[in-house]
Image (tube, rainbow, N blue to C red):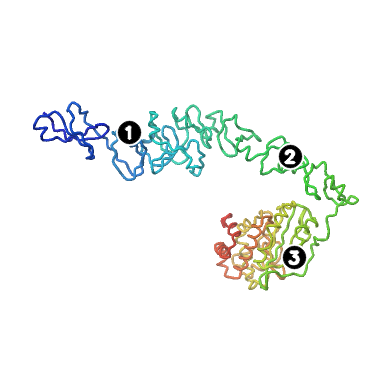
Amino acid sequence: MLQDISNNIYMINGEKMRVEVLAENLANGLDYYFLRGVDRTHVVEHILASDLPEPYIPNYVEVLKGAIYVQNCSLQVAGVDMTIDTNVEGTFVPRDSNTGAFLTHGYISINGLYGYCDRHGRFWNLAYRHYNLDDKFCQEESCDIVTWSKLEADALPIKYEGIDGHTNRKNLEFSDFSDSYALRNSDDWAVEDGKTFTKEDLAMGLVSGYAVCSECGKIEDEGEMSTIDGECICQDCLENEFIWSDHQQDYIRRDYATWVECVDSYVDDETLNDEFERCQCCDEYFLSEDMYTTDDSYTLCEYCYENETDNGYYNSENGFIEDYDYRPEPTFFGGDQTKYLGLEWEIDGGGENGYIAQKIFGDVKEVYCKHDGSLDAGFEVVTHPCTPEYMLNLPWNNWCNQVLDEGYDNRNGVGIHIHVSRRHFTGRSAIGRLVRFFAENYDDMRKFAARSESSAREWANYACIDEDFTDEDCYEASMDDKYYAVNVLHNASIEIRIFATAYQPQTIKAYIQMVDVLSDLANGEYCNFTFANIRKEAENRGYAEMVSRLDYYNL
């Protein structure tokens, strides 16, 4: 006689089904059953009682939204809170091997294979990919997608480990399966004897045969590394960051390498300074032992000494560089305004050479060149008064390129001074507010001006003021010396002296823009004299170079 077993669930051909007892079967005592799938779809009309398997006992697991689970041999991520029967073949909910906690989408290790499980249940194998400290991996679209069916097909024991970001990925156990994904050339990992080792492990001596590149931090076999100055360098960095020097018989850094024609080789800066000198005539480098000194103290190569001197003298002066006290009648450029700027640009390092000065500035009506005794090997370029807009549109790009090409690249103790028409200010109080601003914001302005602290205090110090000083008091506090950041001793102008010299046009323009903004704010209330308002004014005027420099120094 058939039993009423309608409450039982049976697994038939991988599908869960319930018995539906037909009345005629019970009445006739027939020894077979009618089964229907629990989802009310498929049916099995007749099955002998003897063919029924043992009743199926489900194992329901509550899965929260975002948790990883496996169903039909496919990795999934729960989109909502749900219940999953893990006794169904190919269905289960993985847990962290160490903590037993459910895994969520993110960085995980499956059987030692490190990767990222996204919100769609795709597992991205990061084994061969660069992984950086910002928790981003490059070329995501090129990463191998390892589906769950691929992992399942290998019929290997599965081990799961949740990985919290970047920091906990060391000393994970690897099975034989994961060795095929060995991270031997990864930035962060090396594999030996089925274990993963980090750079820190290498430093502690826990693994041998590997080395960390001192340039990029990449782990490589020691045999593939080069040693430069006692540091291990990988092949990629050797090719990209270094260059061979025949003269020094060693690799040197590309950033500090200079081609020297006389030895047909690159040399680094230290060797260049120790063994070579630049001819002050042709501007080429030669071995110091091969140089000649003229009676007027110029250093020349053999060719220039023999062909460019007259009775042992080499006179580069042609009258284009004026004496220091030269004061021409000013010419005003940019229209009739009350506000003009004048700029003094000290350039140094290439010699006080009138021919070079004339080659660069000879056809420029807005500037003239002067001797400056504070410079070792250069001269001063002075502009006539210009409106701010006119001065910003001078050919700074062209001048900077030519100046650098001629070897004027010394920045030590060399400055740029910018004058503002005194009549632009509403009075001594306005100028006093400018003095107060530099005194109270000296370090920030010194950073913006690229001045070292020692150089700034020597050539452009701040005036000593007290909290109870009026604006007039601040003005008077700066009247005893010209070597202040704000020099008030000129009759027709106020001089801002704090800026270090520059050979990049964007830096020079940022200096000009800053003086333009500060000189306008000085005519208002001091409570408005803040970096927030300075930035706002720069943005309103379209001063991109100044805004970029404020951003760089977080001002």
Residue at (38, 28) in percent of width and height: 155
The foreground one among 318 and 32 is: 32
Q: Amino acid at mark 3?
A: Lys
Secondary structure beneath label 2: strand
The foreground one among 277 and 463 is: 277
- Quadrant location, the C terminus: bottom right
Q: Position of residue 36 (x, y in %)?
A: 20, 36
Q: Which residue is mark 1?
A: 90
Q: Which residue is mark 2?
A: 265
Q: Which residue is mark 3?
A: 365
Residue at (49, 26) in percent of width and height: 193
CA gap, disc 2 and disc 1: 67 Å
Of mark 2 and mark 1, the one earlier in the sequence is: 1
CA gap, disc 1 and disc 3: 85 Å
221 lies above or below 372: above
Residue at (80, 56) in percent of width and height: 355
Q: Position of residue 101 (x, y in %)?
A: 36, 38
The outermost residue toward the front is: 45
Q: Is residue 444 left or right of residue 74?
A: right
Q: Amino acid at mark 1?
A: Gly
- Quadrant location, the N terminus: top left
Secondary structure beneath label 1: loop
